[in-house]
Amino acid sequence: MNTMQYKGYTAKIEFDERDNIFWGKVMGLQDRITFEGDTVKKLQADFEAAIRHYLADCKQTGIKPHKPYSGNLMLRVGSKTHAAAAIAAESTGKSLNQWASEVINRAAQA
């Protein structure tokens, strides 16, 4: 997946062959933030402008902007999966949190 990052916000980038433009959508927000550009440089500039506009609009309206992810993750899994993960973590000499963080990180990078 092609992405861009700015001020901790991440956007997924696509290319529209029909209109011959790049476009992006900021991920992880309830609000919809999109941007576009016919070059990567223009795309990056429009992305940064969109984030600045979003933050300024939130400040002006008194709404707390959605922040990039905190790093805290609540996860519910079945008891068998929980047990298997705990055993896998223990077998590597790691806490379940350390092990799960590494597994999730590898999967997210794939």
Image (cartoon, rainbow, N blue to C red):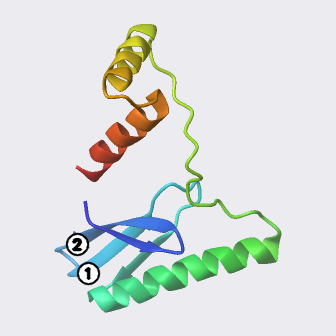
The answer to whether residue 14 is seen in the rendering is yes
What kind of element bears circle 1?
Answer: strand
Residue 7 drawn at (x, y percent): 54, 74
The answer to whether residue 38 is seen in the rendering is no
Label 1 is placed on what type of residue?
Ile
Residue 49 drawn at (x, y percent): 53, 85
Above or below residue 15? Residue 48 is below
Residue 52, image quadrant: bottom right
Label 2 is placed on what type of residue?
Asp
Residue at (59%, 52%) from the top-left corner? Answer: 70
Other-residue count near label 2 (Cα within 10 Å), few / some / many at <14 / 14–19 / ≥20? few
The answer to the question of whether label 1 and label 2 lie on touching residues, with beta carbons closer than 8 A, is yes
- Tell me the distance, in whole angstroms, between the alpha carbons under discs 1 and 2: 5 Å
Tell me the residue that label 2 is attached to.
16
Tell me the residue that label 1 is attached to.
21
Above or below residue 12? Residue 48 is below
Q: Nearer the viewer, residue 75 or 52?
A: 75
Residue 35, image quadrant: bottom left
Question: The N terminus lies in which quarter of the figure?
Answer: bottom left
Residue 71 drawn at (x, y percent): 55, 49
Earlier sequence position, callout 1 versus callout 2: 2
